[in-house]
Structures are given as structure tokens and as C-alpha cells.
Image: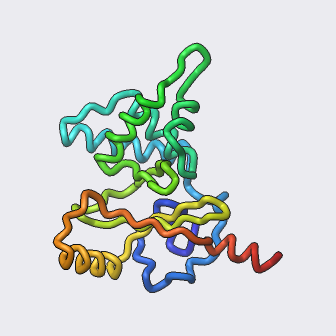
């Protein structure tokens, strides 16, 4: 857990003022695994019921796999984890499940990695997600920033552009990896 009580790709706080001071954190202490997956599945069930959607077994298992992993996963990796001897799950089926989960704000697609991460909180209509992607360790931190929101709103208004999604991906090196590099 970091100083915000969050880890990795599910940070909830505006870190604009703390950019660069995020610091190293121990990913071994992060809340990945069955408990986290259970919380996300419960949220998905509530959402499906409220919206009259079908939350199929494949959609459920796909969400569980993404949540339990603790790192971005591609559709083929997910299909492999869902497959059992004698019963292979097709990647196209996983992509359909991921489309559903993405459309309803349960997972995010990291375009630069063609991989998926869980989202434990709902984003408001038009709210952006900012992903900080470490090139060294592969960690992905999700955050929001009111300052980035305002700047993006101005830019979009000036361009007369209506976005289909508002996801910003920033690649670099996380604080933990910077600390390791300095220690070497």
C-alpha cells in the first residue's frame, strides 16, 4: 500500500500535487487476490442487476482473473488462465467478456499494452483515468487529477472534439524502480 492507502492500478486520490513524491511502495502488500476479486464481482453483480444486464459465468471469471492477477493481462493470458485440460476458452470469447466489463466500467484497457486492469471505483460520466505505467517493473497506477481534467476539458472544447473515452497513459519509471536504480 502507498501513502494514499491504495496500490497499483486502483488509486483513487488526486495526486497532482504529489506528483513525483508518490515514492516506492511494496507491491507485495497490495490488495490483489480473491478478496479483491470478490469485492469487484459483488459490485459487478449489483451493477448488472440495477441495469438489467446479464453477468454471465464467463464475464464473472474474466473479472476474477483480472482482479486476482495484480498486473495488466492480455486476452490470451486470461483465456489461458480460464482454460482447463480438455476445455479451451477462446480468446474471442474473452474479448467479448472484456468488452462488456470495459463498457460498464469494471475494467480498463491499457492501450499501449493491449492489456486489462480492474477498476474498483466507478468513474463519473466524462471523468478521465490517468495511468502511470512503469517501463521497468510493469506496474500500472490508476489515478485521477482535477488539474488534468480541467486542461483536457479546455483542449477538447477548443478543438470541438467529443471523446469516446478519456484515458491518459503516461509511461516512465515508478518511484520504487527509481529508488532501485539509484541504489545500484
Q: Does residue 167 appear to the left or right of 74 in the view shown?
A: left
Q: Residue at horizontal 44%, vertical 54%?
A: 111
- Residue nearest the observer in this picture, 136 or 25: 136
- Residue nearest the observer in this picture, 139 or 42: 139
Q: Does residue 71 appear to the left or right of 17 in the view shown?
A: right
Q: Position of residue 158 (x, y in %)?
A: 19, 79
Quarter that holds the C terminus: bottom right
Q: Residue at horizontal 47%, vertical 51%?
A: 117
Q: Residue at horizontal 54%, vertical 42%?
A: 34
Q: Position of residue 37 (x, y in %)?
A: 48, 44
- Name the image colouring: rainbow
Q: Quick one: which residue is furthest to the front in this view?
A: 159
State the image quarter where residue 129 is shown.
bottom left
Number of labels in the image equals: 0
Q: Quick one: which residue is furthest to the top in this view?
A: 86
Q: Position of residue 40 (x, y in %)?
A: 41, 46
Q: Residue at horizontal 67%, vertical 64%?
A: 136
Say above or below: 149 vs 116.
Answer: below
Say above or below: 39 vs 17.
Answer: above
Q: Does residue 140 appear to the left or right of 42 in the view shown?
A: right
Q: Position of residue 6 (x, y in %)?
A: 51, 65
Q: Does residue 96 appear to the left or right of 77 in the view shown?
A: left
Q: Quick one: which residue is furthest to the bottom in this view?
A: 17
Quarter that holds the N terminus: bottom right
Say above or below: 154 vs 160.
Answer: below
- Residue nearest the observer in this picture, 143 or 120: 143
Amino acid at each position: 500500500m502507498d501513502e494514499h492507502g491504495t496500490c497499483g492500478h486502483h488509486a483513487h486520490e488526486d495526486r497532482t500535487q504529489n506528483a513525483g513524491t508518490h515514492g516506492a511502495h511494496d507491491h507485495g502488500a497490495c490488495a490483489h487476490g480473491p478478496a479483491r476479486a470478490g469485492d469487484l464481482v459483488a459490485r459487478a453483480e449489483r451493477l448488472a442487476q440495477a441495469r438489467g444486464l446479464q453477468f454471465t459465468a464467463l464475464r464473472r471469471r474474466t473479472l476474477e482473473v483480472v482482479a486476482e492477477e495484480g498486473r495488466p493481462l492480455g486476452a490470451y493470458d486470461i483465456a489461458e488462465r480460464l482454460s482447463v485440460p480438455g476445455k479451451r476458452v477462446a480468446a474471442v470469447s474473452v474479448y467479448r467478456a472484456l468488452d462488456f466489463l470495459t463498457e460498464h466500467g469494471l475494467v480498463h484497457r491499457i492501450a499501449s499494452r493491449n492489456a486489462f486492469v480492474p477498476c474498483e471505483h466507478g468513474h463519473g460520466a466524462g471523468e478521465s483515468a490517468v495511468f502511470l505505467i512503469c517501463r521497468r517493473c510493469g506496474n500500472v497506477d490508476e489515478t485521477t487529477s482535477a488539474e488534468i481534467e480541467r486542461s483536457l476539458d479546455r483542449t477538447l472544447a477548443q478543438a470541438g472534439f467529443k471523446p469516446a473515452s478519456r484515458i491518459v497513459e503516461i509511461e516512465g519509471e515508478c518511484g520504487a524502480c527509481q529508488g532501485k536504480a539509484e541504489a545500484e
